[in-house]
Image (spheres, rainbow, N blue to C red):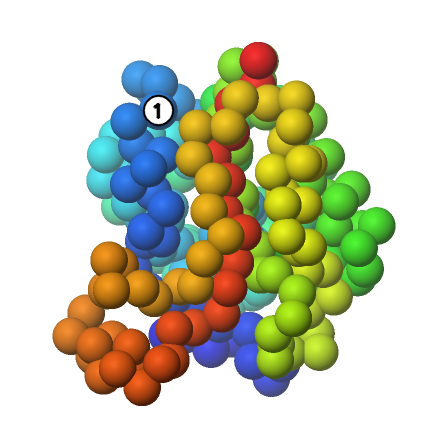
Amino acid sequence: MADYSKKGHYYIEEPRFELKHLMPLLPNNAHILDMGAGNGNNTKFFLERGYKVTAVEPNPAAIKILEALQEDYPEQLHIVEASVATFKPKQKFDVVVCCMVVHFMNDHTAGASAIRNIQSWTRPKGINLLTGYMIGQPLSKDYSFLFEPTELSQLYADWKTHWYQESFRLTWNRIYNLTDVPRLLLGKRGFKAARIIAQQV
């Protein structure tokens, strides 16, 4: 993991496991908005498969990593230094991906508003992949917006849900590498999160 701040914010190196559920739904030539792109773990995954990506990220250290990636994909990758709260897009996107970002919103009202914005940045029949931590866990005090059970699905009630989970990061059916096995044996499953892939109808 790469740590880019004193508050313990981090970005994972590997693409999010949720992408395997998203890929069968992606239209050809989709323009993807990666909101809170971090070090480009998801962005690179999409670029390698030929998609155009707008990567939005507020952290200057992470922006430098994205700019290095842009050298390999100058025609596909557009970078915007902004947060989910400050981003002002001039277009809509076929797909918006926002993984483990909204918990940084200032409060519950701001978090719900951010999700409505994400939905509004999506083209008709477009797709959202959104994930976020859930309440009732020993998480950082910096995380001000945490989902109640079923809350994320309710925020997408008027969309078509293709996939939804409320689960821990690690399970015996979802192991990222061999070092995860002893963690699971010790009961260390990570933190519980809500995850949705939904489409405008």
Residue 163 in view in this figure: yes
At horizontal 53% and vertical 22% (from top left) the residue drawn is 160
The amino acid marked with disc number 1 is: Leu
Q: Which residue is mark 1?
A: 25
At horizontal 84% and vertical 50% (from top left) the residue drawn is 109
Judge by depth and name the residue closer to the eye, 166 or 54.
166
In the image, residue 108 sits, relative to residue 187, either above or below, namely: above
Residue 117 location, x and y as percent?
A: 71, 35
Task: Report which quarter residue 177 is drawn in.
Answer: bottom left
Q: Quadrant of the N terminus?
A: bottom left
Residue 58 in view in this figure: no
At horizontal 81% and vertical 60% (from top left) the residue drawn is 107
- The crowding category of the residue bearing disc 1, from other C-alpha atoms within 10 Å (few below 14, some 14 to 19, many at least 20), is some
Horizontal side, residue 192 vs residue 176: left or right: right
Residue 190 location, x and y as percent?
A: 43, 73
In the image, residue 152 sits, relative to residue 89, either above or below, namely: below
Query: How many marks do you count on the picture?
Result: 1
Judge by depth and name the residue closer to the eye, 56 or 133.
133
In the image, residue 155 sits, relative to residue 199, either above or below, namely: below
Q: Quadrant of the C terminus?
A: top right
Horizontal side, residue 178 vs residue 36: left or right: left
Horizontal side, residue 1 vs residue 115: left or right: left
At horizontal 74% and vertical 66% (from top left) the residue drawn is 144
